[in-house]
Image (spheres, grey):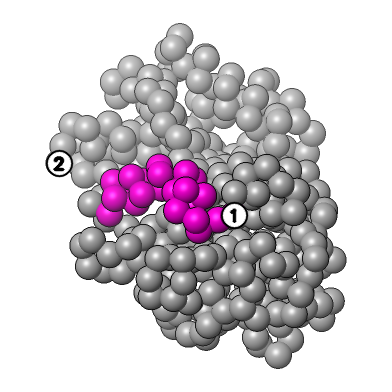
């Protein structure tokens, strides 16, 4: 998605909730009725040409079901709908008629779930023929994704070309009444879901993608995945120029890293020193090793988690993360990374 696309989508989404009711797209009862739950609404352009009418939609419910997670949504527009779902590519197992672009972001465990495939290699999701209609009303769609962990209470649901609803509650109650699968207009029941008992384990695994988060401060950059965390400490804070003795400023940064390790670290903690390209290869290798060893020595009494061991090494000017021809790039390359497993699956 380009930066030019965002403002248009955000502007459309800002009026989506009021327009869905005011324009007669979503029944007024949906705003406060248990019969038609609405967790949030979204909108995005309905085509590639300027001025085309937007696609409107609503996320109704995210429900725990046996062996999976069901997402109910509705979508429609004031004219012939184009571009409701991205076309399937070589990297997806879905067919062109599958309304497959329904995702759930589990930020707590850094996972992104998509619809699963059945044992017959069919998408457990609506067909685009059931939701791609020429009407001012909204048709109900569904998708079945992998089971969510029990400790997940709220998620973000993504839809189609940039639609997203945040803070959607995860419930155990399916909306009623259920009707036959196929085209169902919102307010006239909910499509009956297929059984998920026979979904192959490899299909469940393939439907879950890993996410990462990156945060930065003046002292460190933290890269966090579902099962591993890496903290790149700024050596300009930890050490004086061309030195391997820790400064007084290093204490706070190292205490914070130790707290992260104590909270969720598992196994071996790898401490690796890096330098920029100023100086000889041999000097930089020695300096990076000495700095990593200094960090290990300081962390050792602070790390109290059982079963955790510390290992230090240096890689000199190898593996740069920025351009060594600039001062800002060289500063980023001068770092000591502390990487550890977090025990996630």
In which quadrant will I find the N terminus? bottom left
Q: Residues within 10 Å of mark 2 (few under 14, many from 20)?
A: few
Horizontally, residue 220 falls left or right of residue 190, namely left
In the displayed structure, 195 sits above or below 52; it is: below
Q: Tell me where the magenta segment starts and ends, as one range.
A: 5-27
In which quadrant will I find the C terminus? bottom right
Residue at 74% x, 54% y: name it: 35
Cα–Cα span, label 2 and label 1 = 60 Å
2 or 1: mark nearer the eye:
1
Residue at 21% x, 44% y: name it: 323
Q: Position of residue 320 (x, y in %)?
A: 31, 46
Q: Position of residue 251 (x, y in %)?
A: 52, 14
- Residue 80 visible within the image: yes
Horizontally, residue 150 falls left or right of residue 27, namely right
Residue at 32% x, 62% y: name it: 53
Main SS, magenta region, reads helix
Q: Single out the residue that lies furthest toward the left.
A: 325
**Considering only order in the chain, which callout, 1 or 2, is on the residue closer to the N terminus?**
1
Of residue 180 and residue 225, the one placed in the foreground of this image is 180
Number of numbered discs? 2
- Which element carries disc 1, helix, strand or loop? loop
Q: Position of residue 77 (x, y in %)?
A: 43, 65
Q: Is residue 137 magenta?
A: no
Of residue 39 and residue 335, the one placed in the foreground of this image is 39
> What residue is pinned by disc 2?
325
> What residue is pinned by disc 1?
27
Residue 279, by quadrant, is: top left
Of residue 323 and residue 81, the one placed in the foreground of this image is 81
Residue at 81% x, 77% y: name it: 195
Horizontally, residue 90 falls left or right of residue 169, namely left
- Residue 107 visible within the image: no
Of residue 129 and residue 337, the one placed in the foreground of this image is 129
């Amino acid at each position: 998605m380009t930066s030019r696309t965002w403002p248009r989508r955000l502007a459309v989404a800002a009026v989506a909730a009021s327009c869905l009711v005011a324009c007669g797209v979503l029944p007024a009862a949906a705003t406060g009725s248990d019969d038609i739950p609405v967790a949030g609404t979204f909108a995005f352009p309905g085509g590639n040409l300027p001025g085309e009418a937007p696609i409107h939609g609503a996320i109704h419910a995210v429900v725990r079901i046996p062996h999976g997670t069901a997402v109910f949504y509705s979508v429609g527009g004031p004219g012939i709908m184009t571009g409701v779902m991205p076309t399937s590519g070589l990297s997806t197992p879905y067919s062109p008629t599958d309304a497959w672009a329904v995702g759930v972001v589990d930020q707590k465990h850094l996972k992104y779930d998509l619809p699963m495939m059945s044992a017959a290699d069919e998408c457990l999701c609506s067909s685009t023929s059931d939701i791609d209609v020429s009407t001012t009303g909204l048709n109900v769609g569904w998708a079945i994704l992998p089971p969510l962990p029990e400790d997940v209470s709220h998620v973000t649901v993504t839809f189609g070309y940039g639609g997203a609803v945040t803070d959607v509650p995860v419930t155990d109650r399916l909306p009623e009444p259920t009707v036959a699968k196929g085209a169902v207009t919102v307010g006239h029941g909910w499509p009956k879901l297929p059984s998920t008992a026979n979904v192959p384990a490899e299909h469940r695994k393939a439907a879950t993608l890993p996410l990462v988060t990156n945060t930065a401060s003046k002292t460190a950059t933290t890269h966090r995945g579902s099962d591993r965390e890496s903290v790149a400490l700024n050596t300009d804070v930890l050490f004086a120029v061309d030195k391997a003795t820790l400064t007084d400023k290093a204490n706070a940064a190292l205490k914070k890293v130790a707290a992260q390790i104590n909270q969720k670290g598992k196994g071996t903690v790898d401490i690796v020193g890096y330098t920029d390209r100023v100086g000889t290869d041999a000097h930089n290798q020695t300096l990076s090793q000495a700095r990593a060893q200094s960090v290990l020595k300081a962390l050792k009494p602070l790390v109290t988690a059982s079963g955790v061991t510390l290992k230090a090494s240096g890689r000199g000017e190898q593996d740069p993360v920025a351009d060594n021809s600039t001062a800002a790039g060289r500063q980023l390359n001068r770092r000591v990374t502390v990487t550890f497993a977090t025990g996630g699956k």
